[in-house]
Amino acid sequence: MTKPVAAVIVLAAGCLWAGSALAADASAPAATAGRAAHGGATAAPASGPTPAPKNAYLYIGYPNNNQTLPAGKPVKVWFGLRNMGVAPKDVRFPNTGHHHLLIDVDLPPMDKEIPNDRNHLHFGAGETETTVELAPGKHTLQLLMGDEKHIPTNPPVYSKKITIYVK
Ligand SMILES: [Cu+2]
């Protein structure tokens, strides 16, 4: 179980935000992991192997639900996350993950790698905002955190799905 943790922490530290909140919550996931031990009698909903804080909160800071946006202009999307941090893909660090923006699709399976296509965008460098080009019409946007291997966490952390109109 010994890994080159020190090097990983240094690499991740620059990409974390809300670092102090992370430190304060450092004890929470252990309890979560213990409670979610495998082999229980009740079937737990599918989720990935990486624990996430139970109070992690993911939301789309912009645009707003039901907002109408002008066609022909890239749409800025802000990723909001509380009680959990962001780290790049391939970096394993407690209480972190990276963002995935789901466009015009429902949530994927929660125990498998998140697809990587034009409807499932990965932000593996630790980005917390982006711009997307959307054709005129009605669209949905939703965020989903994935661990360093792009698998949703346990519990899965995802935002409300919002609807926007481009015209
Ligand atoms: Cu990913």
Image (spheres, rainbow, N blue to C red):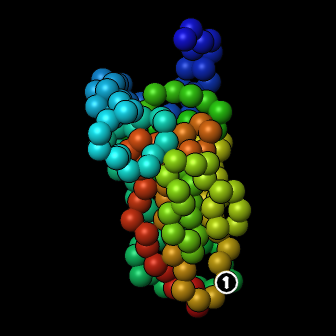
> What kind of element bears circle 1?
loop
Viewer-side residue, 77 vs 43: 43
Q: Is mark 1 within 8 Å of ligand 1?
A: no
The answer to whether any part of residue 128 appears in the image is no
Amino acid carrying label 1: it is Ala
Relative placement, left or right, of 32 versus 108 is left
Relative placement, left or right, of 73 versus 112 is right
Above or below, comparing residue 32 to residue 46 in the picture: above
* Label 1 sits on residue: 135
Q: Quadrant of the C terminus?
A: bottom right
Q: Quadrant of the N terminus?
A: top right
Viewer-side residue, 78 vs 120: 120
Q: Residue at x 65, y 44 (%)?
A: 124
Relative placement, left or right, of 156 versus 135 is left
Q: Residue at x 57, y 75 (%)?
A: 104
Report crowding for label 1: few under 14, some 14 to 19, many 20 or more residues within 10 A (C-alpha): some
Count of all numbered marks drawn on residues in the image:
1
Viewer-side residue, 145 vs 13: 145
Q: Residue at x 54, y 60 (%)?
A: 108
Percent across and percent down for residue 33 are: 35, 30
Percent across and percent down for residue 34 are: 31, 26
Percent across and percent down for residue 110 are: 49, 52
Q: Residue at x 55, y 20 (%)?
A: 9
Above or below, comparing residue 161 to residue 49 in the picture: below
